[in-house]
Amino acid sequence: MHKMMRRRMRFWILLTVWTMALGSGTTVSARADQVLTPREVARLKSAASPVISPDGKRVAYLQVVQRDPYADPDQGDVKFEDGPSYMELFVIDLPNGEPRPFITGQVSIGGLSWSPDSRAILFLDKRGKDENKCLYRIPIDGGEARRVLSHEADVISYSLSPDGARVAFRAEAKKPKEKKELLDKGFKAEVYEEDLSPIHVWVAPLDDPAQKPRKLPLEGSAVSLQWSPAAAQLAVALAPTPLIDDIYMQSRVHVVDADSGDVICKLDNPGKLGPIAWSPDGRLLAMISAEDIHDPSEGRLMVAPATGGPLKDVLPNYLGHVNAIAWQDRDTIMYLGDEGVATTFGKVRADGSQQKVLVGRGDLMLTGFSLSRDGLKGAFVADSAIHPSEIYLIEHENLTPRRLTDSNPQLSDFRMARQEVVTYKARDGLELEGILIRPLDEEPGHRYPLILYVHGGPEAHERNGWLTNYGRPGQVAAARGFAVFYPNYRGSTGRGVAFSKLGQGDEAGKEFDDLVDAISHFAENGLVDKKRVGITGGSYGGYASAWGATALSEHFAASVMFVGISNAISKKGTTDIPNEDYLVHTRSRMWDDKWQFYLERSPIYHVKKARTPILILHGKDDPRVHPSQSMELYRHLKTIGEVPVRLVWYPGEGHGNRRAAARLDYNLRMMQWLEHYLIGPGGDPPPMELEYGFEKPAPKTTDPSPDKDKDEEEPA
């Protein structure tokens, strides 16, 4: 970077920090480590995928470790190599043990389960000289992990037989030798959506390499599988093809004989499909399903006999969405439900009777769980407004969730802005909810810039939990003097099927008016300066960000669009989910005399109205929203030349960034753009090049003196 550019960048950063300090009442001398920054967000860990042992004595889980771009090998850190997060294996001995590292470092563990006798953990990984991802087992009382199943392709997922002697798994077949030879010679032509590799179901003895896995003769591509706890039967979700559109809309549950592969029955679940769970006696199957083919999201708790028959919705008219299930006993299902911006934990009989909420709406957002064999203990994933996902325990005799992990103890040293649930009314009287993070050092009577973060989907919703990551400004923005609001606009999940359908056939209509109505709400109560409002989000939130910068440009002073839609017509011809888009979103086709409608619901149709500076970011390998969507909007705005616009590609990334460097870059650019136009000088775009702050810190010291100054962090 040229010296002049570096000086300009430093000047702009210092000016922004000074402006924020004056606006929020903080002092410039406040230590950087008191508040969250993009640099700290890039180092946060989280806990995931808890599995409680059948005997209820231990919990295995994954610790998600972001690769640290600021790692310093001279200080004992692992050398940074860009890529997705590492997944480490930890175990907790109940009732009061500390998390024990089992497999850590530069690993990517997945697919955790316990052996039936609770003496070993099984997991998927690619280790050593493995050519493909294999199944491993590690003893709980010590010893090395040992491979117990390998295959000619990656093992994608698996399920053990009740006695642990056999395993059913999902994998592709080995590619023909002839095809590999042609590829090596340079014949790499791709026949789009025809040259497909279906996912098969295989059955094999566990830990017997002499016997090759046997492929079951099932038609279609396997999406998920579960072995019956009481018989040699499998519940297999099959889609006609491995295309994501078919997986979303046409996955159907089949009960299959594990020995012959014969289909015993097919359960006609309507529309989208989530997790499947056998009752302990193998009589019944529970699943999270859509209500009908037009339901935007799976969220109904359905039960059916494993011998076939109609599905029964055991929580009819539930004004929420079920997100996880497990059987407590042969007649009782436990479930997690999203209800508005909160979650609940409850149980219900398989016939739909005796529903009971065990853990009501509170400060913890429960998002996944696993039960012991007797159903009296459960390990949960939960996050809150002050910490990312951690592992919690709930027991029959004590229904108050008890925290087992602390993945980020450093967070206790950070000042956090206040977070609260806000209810407001849309212009047509519809009551809406969202979560507000207030400016960290808010002063009464002062109006603040607002960042509106719009979730994707739109079949998704925001919970009142941890709302800060590489793409969510959250606490980072609040520390810099912003108010941040996460609206659950109409069409969001968490409030029942009818509410989630409110945006169908009206994309960019009332659903995006709901966003403007949120701004009006905060302006009327005195919190927000209407002239300093920014909008950001990814996917459908990116669509909203493009719409806010064009059709609704008078309401927004800055926009950051991520993997968003700009042309509703060309999007439908380039996405990998055209049928899902039609069935649960648009409910009409362009050729049904709708060309003009979709044209007018395209941000590019409104580019002449654009007065909002927009930063456009997109993964170059996105199959969901083609990168051309970003190119179209950029090219039109650039040609007109009346508004600042910048386009940033992320090579190798898809519909969302997975690699550490791309995530950090995104976070820095998002905050830079919003600060520049909502707090800073505005005008021409901020410098193209970023200062990532990779200067080495001063050597670590063991001096415990409390009045010794700490090294200040390089501003992001």
Image (tube, rainbow, N blue to C red):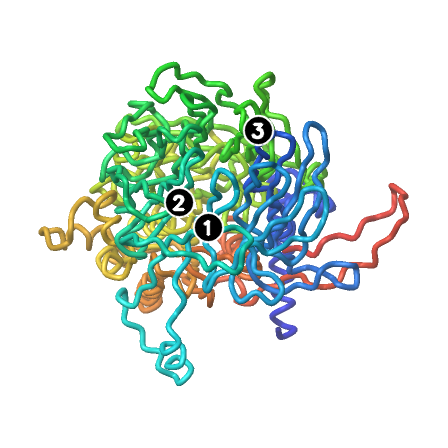
| Placement of 444 over or under 513, stated as above or below | above
Q: Nearer the viewer, residue 604 or 470?
A: 470
Dot placed on the residue nearer the N-terminal end, 2 or 1: 1
State the residue at coordinates (69%, 34%): 93
User: What number is the disc on residue 560?
Assistant: none
Disc 2 and disc 3: Cα gap in Å? 56 Å
User: What number is the disc on residue 225?
Assistant: 2
Label 1 neighbour load within 10 Å: few <14, some 14-19, many 20+: many
The residue to which callout 3 is attached is 444
Q: Quadrant of the C terminus?
A: bottom right
Residue 23 is drawn in which quadrant? Answer: top right
Judged from this view, the residue extending furthest toward the left is 593
Q: Nearer the viewer, residue 406 or 40?
A: 406
Query: Residue 452, percent across and down?
Result: 44, 42
| Placement of 33 over or under 192, stated as above or below | above
Judged from this view, the residue extending furthest toward the front is 210
Query: Residue 177, percent across and down?
Result: 39, 76
The residue to which callout 1 is attached is 157
Dot placed on the residue nearer the N-terminal end, 2 or 3: 2
